[in-house]
């Protein structure tokens, strides 16, 4: 699913919502896109600060450090030192487990 399809799906699932003036209106695709942009920014900023993002039952996103180690160099056949590496680890929650393990 690409971003455009995701926005369309969210718009369909939310449907019409009651507004402050009592009318029912759908969120526009632009509003949903702005929400997704803000969500991405918040998650990236949090991970950049070293925080974890935990959405109970959905997913856990953490910044981890892979320790330095030695590895085989296939070009030379020797051993090379691999420095510490930072990476992002995404752990699926119970909702994903329920779908995958049906």
Image: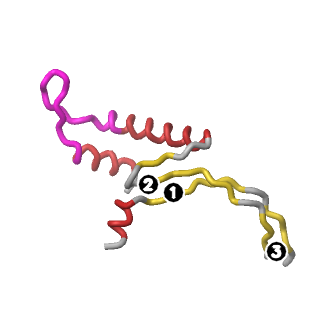
**Where on the picture, by quarter, is residue 101?**
bottom left
Label number found at residue 90: 1
Is there a contact, CB below 8 Å, between mark 2 and mark 1? yes
Q: Looking at the picture, does residue 66 appear above or below residue 21?
A: below
Check the image and name the residue furthest to the bottom: 77
Q: Horizontal placement of 97 versus 16: left or right?
A: right
Instruction: Name the spot of residue 85 as percent of width and height, x first.
Output: 71, 56
**Where on the picture, by quarter, is residue 81?**
bottom right
Crowd tier of the residue under label 1, counting other residues whose Cα lies within 10 Å: few below 14, some 14–19, many 20 or above: some
Q: What is the spatial separation of the Cα atoms under label 2 and label 3, in whole angstroms? A: 39 Å
Check the image and name the residue furthest to the top: 21
Q: Which residue is drawn at the image coordinates 41% and 59% (left, top)?
A: 93
Kindly identify which residue carries mark 3.
75
Q: Horizontal placement of 46 versus 21: left or right?
A: right
Label number found at residue 59: 2
Q: Which residue is drawn at the image coordinates 81% and 73% (left, top)?
A: 73
Answer whether residue 96 is magenta in the image: no
Crowd tier of the residue under label 3, counting other residues whose Cα lies within 10 Å: few below 14, some 14–19, many 20 or above: few
Which quadrant is the N terminus positioned in? bottom left
Magenta segment boundaries in residue numbering:
13-32
Q: Which residue is drawn at the image coordinates 25% and 35% (left, top)?
A: 27
Element type at mark 1? strand
Element type at mark 2? strand
Nearer-N-terminus badge (2/3)? 2
């Amino acid at each position: 699913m690409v971003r455009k399809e995701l926005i369309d799906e969210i718009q369909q699932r939310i449907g019409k919502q009651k507004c402050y003036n009592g009318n029912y209106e759908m969120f526009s695709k632009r509003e949903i896109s702005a929400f997704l942009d803000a969500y991405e920014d918040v998650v990236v900023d949090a991970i950049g600060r070293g925080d974890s993002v935990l959405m109970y039952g959905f997913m856990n996103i953490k910044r981890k450090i892979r320790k330095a180690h030695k590895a085989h160099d296939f070009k030379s056949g020797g051993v090379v030192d691999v420095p510490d590496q930072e990476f992002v680890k995404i752990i699926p929650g119970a909702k994903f487990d329920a779908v995958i393990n049906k």
